[in-house]
Structures are given as C-alpha cells and as structure tokens.
Image (tube, helix red, strand yellow):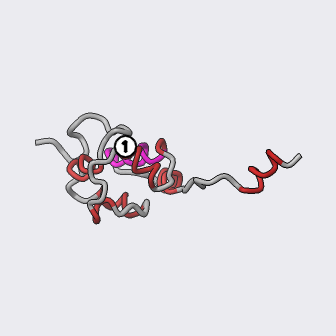
Amino acid sequence: MSSPGTSGGPITGSTTIVELLQRFPGGEAAELMARLAWPCAHCSGALHEPISMAAKRHANRAGPVVRAFQALERGGPSESELAEAAARQDKRADPAALWSRYAR
C-alpha cells in the first residue's frame, strides 16, 4: 500500500481536485484548498478541474499553486510557499493605465 501523497505520479498543473483529495486522504489537500480560500473540497463545484485552471478561476498564479500542492508530498507547504500561492492577481487592468494608452 502506498503512503499518502506518493501514488499516481507527480503532481502537475493537470492534476485534478479529485486526484488531490484521493492522494491525501488525511485531509492535507482539502486543508490547503481551504487556506487558499478555495471551496472545491466542500462544494463539489469543480472537482474534476485541473489545479492550474482552478488557480486561474480563483485569481491565483498557477505556478505557485502547483508548487504548494507538490510541497504536500514533503510535509509542506512552507509559509512563504503558501503566501505566494494564496496571492491574488488583479484580473482587470487599471483603468487609468488603459486610458493613458489612448489619451495623447
């Protein structure tokens, strides 16, 4: 029997929410999703969505999110990895910056 977090190959951006929850039956993946403010583990809204797409949907950068989930396999993520993964990107451009392109 495999230990949690080691079955199914490496965690990549195409690893789904369901696969993560199955990989970590002790709740580590669900806890990380909660710390990222992702309700996936609770609402079942996008269980079969890859984590890279979930990151984009929740305005997080995919790379740091994938690295945070990979860190679960070695007992992480660290506080700095978590902070980087949890950082939100502003989806909309600054209106003043857009206006300055056209105002001459």
What residue is drawn where x is 24% and y is 52%? 24
In the image, taking residue 47 as reference, residue 65 lies left or right, namely: right
Q: Quadrant of the N terminus?
A: top left
What residue is drawn where x is 18% and y is 45%? 3
- Count of all numbered marks drawn on residues in the image: 1
What residue is drawn where x is 81% and y is 49%? 100
Q: Main secondary structure of the magenta part?
A: helix
Decide which of 85, 50 is in the foreground and name it: 50
Asked if residue 11 is positioned above or below residue 68 in the image, the reply reads above
Residues packed near mark 1 inside 10 Å, few (<14), some (14 to 19) or many (20 plus): some
Percent x, y of residue 23: 22, 47
Decide which of 82, 38 is in the foreground and name it: 38
Percent x, y of residue 82: 47, 55
In the image, taking residue 62 as reference, residue 3 lies left or right, namely: left
What residue is drawn where x is 32% and y is 59%? 40
Residue type highlighted by circle 1: Gln
Farthest residue, direction right: 104
Which residue is under mark 1?
70
Where does the magenta region start and end? 64-74
Percent x, y of residue 88: 55, 56
Which type of secondary structure does the marked residue at label 1 adopt?
A: helix
Asked if residue 96 is positioned above or below residue 11 in the image, the reply reads below
Farthest residue, direction left: 1
In the image, taking residue 64 as reference, residue 13 lies left or right, namely: left
Percent x, y of residue 28: 30, 57
